[in-house]
């Protein structure tokens, strides 16, 4: 029985390895030098014109360095004065560092909302990419910068702009479990069923695998497809069943997910739950007598202990007494400290 997708689903927007970062930076610098040499080649033009052009470029670089210095220091007041009193801001505002990061990208990563607002006011490019092909919106979603996200989207940032491998902003937010950010992206018409190219994973599959209950709930409410399959034929229910996420399994079942849908290895969600030892998930998937609803499973009184009475009932092949155990747990859990499954939900 093969394991499903890796827990590391989406690479960090600014966390490339040193080797990859250096390679990207060198490539970016080589492209810059090639472009600059093309611009600088004047052939028959006077030498003084070429020198004047180089002088302007040097001045813009110096201004850009000053801009970055003020951003790193977080000095909003001096930055505002600098932008207000400096001519031809558009000539250096969107210049990039050696790693391809713009001033706006850096401000977003550092969580400097006031500086982000200033840069946007003066025309910073909202969809500018770094060397890794990520944008400021990708970074904002990964780092939970809600203020920056709202400002970027208000300034017409492309909510569905793809990074490497087709990764979008909503994939970052779903992986991190930021349901409030997922809801903002949905409000701006993000494609919540968009797939990561290499794996076919959707936001719903990512959130289901990692146990982000509120994200799954928000995506399903918005209309995310519970039947969508990744490149190996796995649905969100396959991932939730494999990881033992009983609340998410109940949500997906309520949304119409099929517990007997086989993947390309002919494994169903029931098979995966059984293989990984989640007998309570098997029971939820195979038996409809509990009639579990989304509202029911969010109640803290619903606790199924893997080493408790319910699990013992399955070991003794007595699924018929499982409903009685569950009803008793629901009735008396407020008075007794009953075991519950360790599960992170967010």
Image: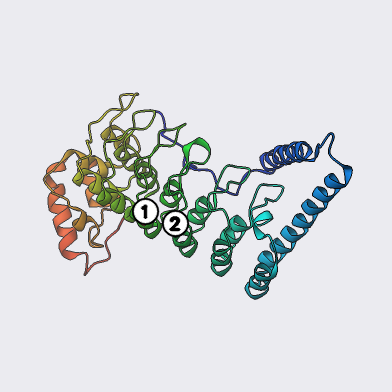
Which residue is labeled 2 in the image?
Answer: 153
| Residue 11 placement, left or right of 222 | right
Instruction: Provide residue 146's location: percent of width, then percent of height.
Output: 45, 62
The Cα–Cα distance between marks 1 and 2, rounded to whole angstroms, is: 8 Å
The residue depicted at 36 percent of the width and 41 percent of the height is: 205
| Residue 57 placement, left or right of 236 | right
Q: Is residue 131 above or below residue 156?
A: above
Q: Quadrant of residue 346?
A: bottom left
Instruction: Provide residue 232's location: percent of width, then percent of height.
Output: 38, 28
Instruction: Provide residue 201's location: percent of width, then percent of height.
Output: 40, 37
Q: From the image, which quarter does the N terminus lie in?
A: top left
The residue depicted at 62 percent of the width and 44 percent of the height is: 16
| Residue 24 placement, left or right of 296 | right
Residue 295 seen: yes
The residue lying toward the viewer, choosing from 70 and 273, is: 70
The residue lying toward the viewer, choosing from 241 and 256, is: 256
Label 2 element class: helix
Which residue is labeled 1 in the image?
Answer: 188
Label 1 element class: loop
Q: Is residue 267 above or below residue 211?
A: above
Q: Residue furthest top?
A: 265
Is the residue under label 2 in contact with that under label 1 (CB below 8 Å)? yes
Q: Quadrant of residue 154?
A: bottom left
Crowd rating for badge 2 (residues with CA inside 10 Å; few <14, some 14–19, many 20+): some
Q: Is residue 2 above or below residue 289?
A: above
């Amino acid at each position: 029985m093969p394991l499903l997708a890796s827990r590391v689903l989406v690479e960090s927007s600014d966390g490339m390895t040193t080797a990859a970062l250096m390679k990207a930076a060198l490539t970016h610098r080589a492209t810059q030098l090639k472009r600059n040499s093309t611009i600088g080649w004047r052939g028959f033009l006077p030498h003084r014109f070429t020198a004047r052009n180089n002088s302007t470029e040097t001045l813009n670089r110096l201004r850009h360095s000053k801009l970055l210095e003020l951003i790193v220091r977080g000095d909003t007041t001096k930055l505002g004065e600098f932008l207000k009193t400096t001519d031809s801001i558009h000539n250096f505002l969107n210049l990039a560092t050696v790693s391809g990061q713009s001033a706006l990208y850096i401000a977003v990563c550092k969580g400097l909302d006031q500086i982000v607002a200033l840069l946007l006011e003066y025309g910073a490019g909202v969809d500018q990419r770094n060397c890794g092909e990520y944008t400021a919106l990708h970074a904002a979603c990964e780092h939970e910068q809600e203020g920056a996200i709202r400002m970027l989207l208000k300034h017409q940032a492309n909510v569905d702009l793809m990074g490497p491998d087709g990764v979008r902003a909503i994939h970052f937010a779903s992986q991190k479990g930021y349901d409030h950010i997922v809801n903002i992206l949905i409000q701006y018409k993000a494609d919540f069923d968009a797939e990561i190219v290499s794996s076919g994973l959707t936001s719903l599959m990512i959130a289901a695998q990692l146990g982000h209950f509120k994200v799954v709930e928000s995506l399903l409410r918005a209309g995310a497809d519970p039947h969508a399959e990744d490149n190996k034929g796995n649905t969100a229910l396959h991932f939730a069943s494999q990881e033992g996420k009983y609340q998410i399994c109940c949500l997906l079942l309520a949304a119409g997910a099929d517990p007997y849908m086989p993947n390309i290895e002919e494994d169903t969600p029931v098979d995966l739950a059984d293989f990984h030892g989640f007998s309570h998930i098997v029971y939820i998937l195979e038996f409809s007598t509990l009639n579990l609803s989304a509202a029911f499973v969010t109640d803290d009184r619903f606790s199924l202990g893997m080493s408790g009475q319910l699990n013992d009932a399955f070991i003794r092949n007595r699924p018929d007494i499982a409903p009685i155990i569950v009803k008793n747990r629901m009735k008396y859990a407020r008075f007794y400290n009953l075991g519950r499954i360790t599960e992170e939900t967010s």
